[in-house]
Amino acid sequence: MTTQDQVRFITAKHAGYRLDLSFLNSIKQGFFQLKKAYNDKRTYKNMSTLPDYILKDIGITREDIQAKLENPVWEPRK
């Protein structure tokens, strides 16, 4: 069942009431943003174990990694 089919079913089920799914979409988008932030945090934590010469090759310093790890997940990226 596709999303459009689900919306049609919900709309038909509620006899003319149009259900606004924007709230649910906002929650879904927020969840995915939070998931991405946690994945980014895990990546920086793993990068902190790399030797300095590899960090230099990819163009990042230990200070950059530490700054990213100190920021809470819910704060916007700088």
Image: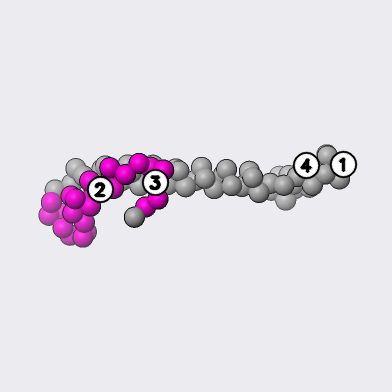
| Contact? badges 2 and 1 (CB < 8 Å) | no
| Contact? badges 2 and 4 (CB < 8 Å) | no
First-in-chain label (3 vs 2): 2
First-in-chain label (3 vs 4): 4
Q: At which x and y percent is residue 39?
A: 38, 44
Q: Label 1 amino acid?
A: Ala
Mark 3–mark 2 distance (CA, rounded to whole Å): 12 Å
Q: Label 4 amino acid?
A: Ile
First-in-chain label (2 vs 4): 4
Q: At which x and y percent is residue 46?
A: 26, 43
Write the residue at 23% across / 52% down. 64
Mark 2–mark 4 distance (CA, rounded to whole Å): 46 Å
Q: Which residue is mark 4?
A: 10
Q: Nearer the viewer, residue 54 or 19?
A: 19
Chain part drawn in magenta: 52-77
Q: At which x and y percent is residue 44?
A: 28, 46
Mark 3–mark 4 distance (CA, rounded to whole Å): 36 Å
Q: Label 2 amino acid?
A: Ala
Write the residue at 44% across / 43% down. 35
Q: Which residue is mark 1?
A: 15
Q: Which of the numbered marks, if any, corresponds to residue 59? A: none
Q: In the image, 7: left or right of 25?
A: right
Can you name the residue that lies furthest to the top here? 13
Q: Which of the numbered marks, if any, corresponds to residue 67? A: 2
Which element carries disc 1, helix, strand or loop? Answer: loop
Mark 2 nearby-residue class (10 Å; few <14, some 14–19, many ≥20): few
Q: Which of the numbered marks, if any, corresponds to residue 75? A: 3
Q: Nearer the viewer, residue 66 or 56?
A: 66
